[in-house]
Image (cartoon, rainbow, N blue to C red):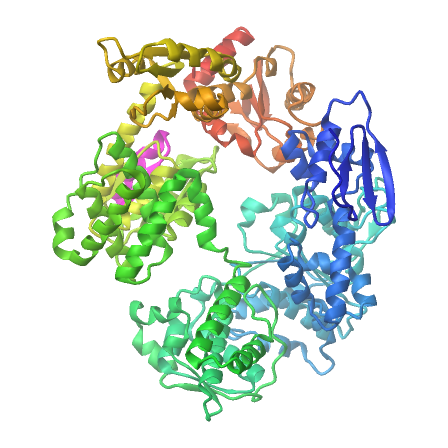
């Protein structure tokens, strides 16, 4: 059936039986689809026709839906004459930009970008700048580029030595860094390429701009002869090809939409400085192209093979990431100068006070009001943990000034001053005044009184915009909104509340550019492991808690949701958690316990489950712990998660996000790392998190479980170690250490007990190879057999190993007894019956519903249960290991020959694209891929993987893989992001020396496959 055309708008795609109607601009084109097509073209067309027109799907997103390569998607789209994602959106975006600019010709780029995103576009400021410059100019748009701001400042009177005086700390902590920056600029003939590293908000961009100003002053040149071209690699990180096109330019026809030859930013920076922010987002091939420019002084544009372009460019790059993990070693070696800027925590108190003064001066000038900051407020600003460094400090001061200005406007004060006191500060700052141990002598030496900041007493540059910076007109908006509400006759109290709520919302939008909204993110993540009815229940519980005890932060929500989800499962299986502290809870937390009883009653009301007294005690402890605002500032049990491969950090991140804390450290042991080095890093992590109550080590397997005892012997720090950890265990551990009554042994014993129960349950299920659906009827097996007959066909399509067992209850044996007997040898997926006979946690559906409405709902339930079962996991795992990808060979004589053979095998069977070999070779050049000096695991890039698979080559004669290392077994991994579970099982195989030894001795493919299948 053709799709119905309800509306015709520009750049929409519609599908007819064998014809695509593409409306582009004012032209209507028809695209004919071959009648012999395999259906992929129609699927591409359908996906594009249903996409969000404001945010069209990139080829990578389309390819992931169809399980084909990105390059294949591009070929199909080009053959159909469909433009790429940016081109499909262009007309709609142009119209919106023209409309906005016509309405407000003086709108800044930043505010234009914000308004477009509010309308539903997901677009970066850089895209607006580079893609729509012509529209902006013709619309009378007041361009406000950051790079132009730097260039407009007069430099004729500046001496080179004066340039860095504006940087706070230039004579103290930053002095050696500034000397490095000067040396990089002064080095003949065109300076030393420089990499600036440091946490977000430490001032990397500011240093790069000052280096440029220093170069202008020293060289006595101007901005036309010595340009400064900034580029943020993150703006195009989702489209590596477009990123490289922006940097190096492209040749006509290099990709869809490349209608003319185009110079890149390297050309524009010729003779000057190219500043690459967030350089870690530059793909490996982009880094390679860049170091060719560094080495040879020439480069190629995209789409060129022979032509070379010369450019004399000094590169300044910046990143907040670990350069050893995120930048190629070949690229790092070519950056001669590395400048690491310290975090705000490592700066002196004097420097931090200088920054606070500077930012308050800026706000006083902006508001044209005198600002008075009390001593207590200044102490808080000096002491709190400022995670976002200088950028966050500036933002928090702006938040404080905005609140102070609101109070000034609403109170109608005669005194022309804005007062900043502790209550005016954001809550996370004001609490620090009472939680931080003061170095009183040092603080009193530099600060002993309130400070007054007068407007216009200093000449400041315009405040640099960043993710932490307020729009300059926010104060004006507050004043205008106040006047409008006052005209409506509202009281000052109500006006203050309305504006405050709006202000808080605006603040969240601004700061969320770096800090994602935790509640929305966590709620979404929680739904993966917590049932929806539990989340709804907890939300109702919190209503009671807040009505009785006041407001709570989101930590209580996460704790209760994860705890109750597990508790209710335990209650269903009669496994209550023993709470040794229950007596203390009743005695010391009387108020919380009474509220907890009210909350627990909701469980019976909504789920039909009575929470036992022990569980009520747990709820009371959570209420007490999360209501205590100082709980995270007191001593706590430390947790360190240690794993092989890149696993631990992911588990830690999820746990910290779920519970809204930052209490856990991760240590990841790379596949080729020496055990001594991993132990040293684990020891350092334990010492970092220890607060006197001991440290819990959660490890995955192998020799890591011995670390705890060794650390205790060396340091005296009490440790407990639990093996075979997973994400849910980490979450549970964090949840337990949040309870102040728990000690290290209590937490470890509780986790061990739950793990043993879980493993026992899993092992028991794994022994049951068959899966069944039980159908029963009160009057005998007749109806049960009828139901079995109508669902049998659909069930067998899911898996032919699922059996349907009809039973009756007129026999002497009860339903429960019959189900018990079946469960001894089988896994029951669903129970279908005439009455709701609840049995453990097995889903139930009534026979009447199946007969009246058909079996569709039942089939969906079976499908979901089956896909979550061990049988499904085994089936998915078997897709990764396939006989067709295994080869035993006597002829291969070199590493390159082995790599080519395996890639060709994966290509022939449509597991990877032909480009996969390039990624494999690049990875080999980056470092070792050998494990335990006996097995090689080469692998390429995920973008070239069509479906997951592992090519295996068993060599009868070992070959030299790297200097001094002989290899006779190779596993070529082609695993995409959806194969994380499979990789964990693959890793257990390849790290087992006994299995590897047996595979090396295998005589044929079947023997190898049998070993893998039973590992």
For the residue pair 401 and 976, the one nearer the viewer reads as: 401
Residue 402 visible in the current orientation: yes
Occupied quadrant, residue 346 = bottom left
Q: Position of residue 203 (x, y in %)?
A: 56, 66
Q: Position of residue 5 (x, y in %)?
A: 76, 40
Query: Which quarter of the figure is the N terminus placed in?
Result: top right
| Residue at image location 77% in from the left, 60% down from the top | 269
Is 933 drawn above or below residue 49 in the view shown?
above
Q: Is residue 814 shown left or right of residue 311?
A: left
Is 21 drawn above or below residue 339 in the view shown?
above
| Residue at image location 75% in from the left, 64% down from the top | 99
Occupied quadrant, residue 208 = bottom right
Does residue 699 belong to the magenta stretch? Answer: yes
For the residue pair 420 and 352, the one nearer the viewer reads as: 420
Residue 684 visible in the current orientation: no
Q: Position of residue 708 (x, y in %)?
A: 28, 39
Q: Position of residue 649 (x, y in %)?
A: 44, 43
Q: Residue furthest bottom?
A: 414
Query: Which quarter of the figure is the C terminus placed in?
Result: top left
The residues colored magenta run 693-714
Q: Is residue 842 shown left or right of residue 345?
A: left
């Amino acid at each position: 059936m053709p799709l119905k055309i309800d509306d015709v708008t520009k750049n929409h795609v519609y599908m007819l039986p064998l014809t695509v109607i593409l409306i582009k601009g004012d032209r209507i084109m028809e695209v004919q689809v071959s009648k012999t097509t395999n259906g992929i073209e129609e699927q591409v067309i359908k996906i594009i026709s249903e996409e969000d027109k404001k945010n069209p799907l990139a080829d990578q997103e389309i390819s992931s839906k169809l399980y084909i390569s990105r390059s294949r998607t591009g070929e199909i789209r080009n053959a159909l004459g469909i433009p790429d994602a940016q081109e499909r959106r262009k007309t709609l975006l142009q119209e919106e930009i023209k409309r906005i600019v016509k309405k407000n010709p003086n709108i800044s780029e930043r505010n234009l970008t914000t308004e477009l995103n509010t309308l539903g576009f997901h677009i970066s400021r850089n895209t607006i700048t580079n893609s729509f410059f012509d529209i902006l100019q013709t619309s009378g748009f007041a361009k406000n580029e950051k790079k132009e701001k730097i260039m407009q400042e007069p430099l004729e009177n500046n001496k080179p030595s004066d340039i860095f005086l504006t940087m706070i700390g230039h004579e103290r902590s930053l002095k050696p860094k500034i000397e490095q920056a000067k040396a990089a600029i002064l080095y003949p003939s065109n300076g030393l390429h420089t990499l600036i590293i440091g946490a977000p908000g430490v001032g990397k961009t500011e240093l790069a701009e000052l280096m440029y100003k220093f170069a202008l002053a020293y060289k006595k040149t101007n901005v036309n002869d010595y340009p400064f071209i900034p580029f943020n690699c993150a703006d195009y990180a989702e489209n590596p090809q477009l990123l490289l096109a922006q940097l190096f330019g492209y040749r006509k026809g290099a990709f869809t939409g490349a209608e003319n030859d185009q110079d890149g930013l390297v050309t524009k920076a010729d003779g000057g400085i190219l500043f690459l922010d967030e350089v870690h987002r530059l793909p490996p091939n982009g880094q390679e192209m860049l170091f060719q420019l560094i080495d040879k002084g020439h480069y190629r544009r995209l789409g060129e093979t022979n032509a070379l372009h010369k450019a004399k460019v000094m590169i300044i790059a910046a990143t907040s990431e670990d350069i050893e993990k995120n930048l190629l070693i070949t690229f790092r070696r070519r950056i001669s100068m590395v400048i690491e800027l310290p975090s705000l925590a490592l700066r002196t108190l004097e420097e931090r006070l200088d920054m606070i003064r500077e930012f308050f001066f800026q706000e006083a000038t902006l508001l044209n009001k005198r600002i008075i900051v009390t001593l207590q407020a200044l102490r808080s600003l000096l002491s709190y943990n400022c995670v976002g460094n200088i950028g966050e400090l500036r933002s928090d001061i702006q938040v404080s000034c905005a609140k102070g200005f609101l109070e000034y406007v609403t109170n109608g004060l005669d005194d022309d001053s804005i007062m900043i006191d502790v209550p005016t500060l954001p809550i996370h700052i004001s609490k620090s005044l009472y939680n931080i141990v003061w170095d009183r002598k040092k603080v009193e030496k530099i600060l002993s009184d309130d400070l007054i900041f007068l407007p216009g007493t200093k000449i400041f540059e315009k405040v640099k915009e960043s993710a932490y910076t307020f729009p300059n007109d926010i104060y004006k908006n507050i004043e205008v909104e106040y006047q409008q509400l006052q005209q409506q006759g509202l009281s000052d109290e109500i006006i203050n509340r309305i504006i405050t709520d709006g202000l808080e919302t605006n603040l969240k939008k601004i700061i969320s550019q770096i800090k994602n909204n935790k509640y929305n993110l966590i709620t979404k993540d929680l739904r993966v492991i917590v049932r929806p009815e539990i989340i709804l229940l907890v939300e109702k519980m919190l209503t009671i808690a807040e009505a009785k005890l006041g407001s709570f932060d989101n930590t209580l929500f996460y704790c209760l949701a994860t705890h109750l989800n597990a508790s209710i499962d335990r209650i269903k299986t009669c496994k209550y958690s023993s709470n040794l502290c229950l007596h203390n809870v009743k005695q010391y937390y009387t108020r919380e316990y009474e509220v907890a009883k009210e909350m627990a009653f909701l469980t019976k009301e909504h789920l039909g489950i009575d929470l036992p007294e022990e569980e009520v005690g747990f709820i009371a402890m959570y209420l007490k712990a999360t209501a205590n605002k100082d709980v995270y500032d007191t001593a706590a049990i430390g947790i360190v998660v240690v794993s092989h491969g890149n696993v631990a950090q992911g588990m830690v991140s999820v746990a910290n996000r779920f519970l809204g804390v930052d209490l856990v450290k991760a240590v990841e042991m790379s596949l080729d790392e020496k055990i001594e080095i991993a132990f040293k890093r684990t020891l350092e992590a334990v010492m970092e998190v220890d607060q006197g109550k001991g440290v819990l080590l959660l490890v995955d397997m192998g020799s890591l479980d011995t670390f705890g005892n060794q650390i205790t012997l060396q340091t005296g720090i009490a440790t407990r170690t639990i093996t075979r950890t997973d994400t849910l265990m980490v979450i549970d551990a964090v949840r337990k250490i949040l309870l102040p009554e728990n000690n290290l042994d209590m937490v470890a014993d509780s986790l061990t007990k739950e793990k043993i129960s879980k493993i026992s349950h899993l092992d028991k299920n794994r022994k049951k190879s068959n899966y069944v659906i039980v159908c029963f009827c009160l009057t005998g097996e007749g109806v049960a057999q009828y139901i079995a007959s109508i669902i049998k066909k659909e069930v067998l399509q899911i898996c032919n190993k699922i059996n349907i067992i009809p039973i009756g209850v007129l026999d002497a044996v009860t339903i429960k007894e019959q189900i018990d007997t079946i469960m001894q040898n089988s896994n029951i997926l669903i129970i279908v019956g005439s009455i709701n006979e609840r049995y453990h946690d097995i889903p139930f559906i009534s026979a009447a519903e199946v007969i009246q409405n058909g079996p569709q709902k039942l089939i969906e339930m079976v499908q979901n249960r089956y896909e979550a079962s061990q049988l499904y996991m085994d089936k998915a795992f078997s897709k990764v290991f396939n006989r067709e990808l295994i080869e035993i060979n006597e002829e291969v004589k070199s590493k390159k020959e082995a790599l080519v053979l395996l890639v060709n095998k994966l290509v022939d069977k449509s597991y990877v694209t032909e480009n996969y070999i390039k990624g494999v070779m690049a990875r080999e050049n980056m470092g070792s891929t050998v494990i335990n000096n006996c097995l090689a695991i080469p692998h390429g890039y995920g973008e070239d993987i069509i479906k997951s698979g592992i090519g295996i080559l068993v060599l009868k004669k070992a070959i030299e893989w790297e200097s001094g290392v002989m290899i006779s077994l190779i596993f070529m991994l082609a695993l995409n992001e959806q194969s994380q579970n499979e990789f964990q099982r693959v890793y257990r195989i390849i790290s087992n020396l006994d299995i590897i030894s047996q595979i090396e001795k295998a005589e044929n493919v079947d023997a190898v496959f049998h070993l893998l299948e039973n590992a």
